[in-house]
Image: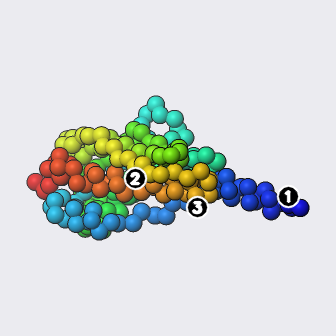
Amino acid sequence: MIRPIPAAIGACLLLTACAEAPLPPPQANLDTIQTIRAANLAAMRVGEFTAAPGKPTEMDKSVAVRAGVQPAPNGSFARYLGDTLATELKAAGRLDESSSLVVTGVVTDTHVDSAMPTAHAWLAARFSLVRGGKTVFDKTLKVDASWDSNFVGAVAIPDAFNHYNGLFDKLAAALLSDPDFQAAARPG
């Protein structure tokens, strides 16, 4: 005889992840720090990061995969992208809150799924770099990931969130290694 409560818990674990832990604070990546230093970027500050106007508000608040929901850290994935960028700049010694060089961003697209057999995630943002009130860089960058998905929710859901969460580091690195951004962000 199967007991109802353990069976229900087992079904929940088998089909869904039920709940996801919040994202940890961003961590600097050694490769990105080396990219920043090698490019000789000027010290800058990180300005406002927001979700694109006209997009669903929920896009910035949480992502859902099957029955699992990952809430945005501090209520905003866009701010998390800005925090990720600030973490990288700070670790490389290039974050200066009083700088007249300011990088901002608008998250324009975000997606994660656990489709079978191949799952997908992507993240796109339009970045601007302003020097002394004049825009010197304005470009949309997009990063993506795809991976083999699993039928079992307890495996597929956390895997999807891990791939999605990794896109924030990947997008910050894409910006910081972009030749146009590097040219615009050099001292002078």
Q: Residue at x 21, y 43 (%)?
A: 137
Could you tell me the amino acid type at mark 3?
A: Ala
Q: Earlier in the sequence, mark 1 or mark 3?
A: 1
Q: Which residue position holds label 1?
A: 4
Image location of residue 104, percent across then percent down: 32, 47
Q: Residue at x 24, y 46 (%)?
A: 129
In the rendered image, which quarter is residue 136 located in?
top left
Question: Is residue 7 at least partly visible in the picture?
Answer: yes
Question: Horizontal placement of 158 versus 121: left or right?
Answer: right
Q: Which residue position holds label 2?
A: 167
Q: Nearer the viewer, residue 140 or 187?
A: 140
Q: Secondary structure at mark 3?
A: loop
Image location of residue 174, percent across then percent down: 28, 52
In the rendered image, which quarter is residue 106 located in?
top left
Image location of residue 21, percent across then percent down: 58, 61
How far apart marks 2 and 3 lie (CA) works out to 17 Å
Question: Horizontal placement of 139 versus 63: left or right?
Answer: left
Quadrant of the image for the N terminus? bottom right
Q: Secondary structure at mark 2?
A: helix
How far apart marks 1 and 3 lie (CA) works out to 27 Å
Q: Residue at x 34, y 51 (%)?
A: 171
Q: Earlier in the sequence, mark 2 or mark 1?
A: 1
Could you tell me the amino acid type at mark 1?
A: Pro
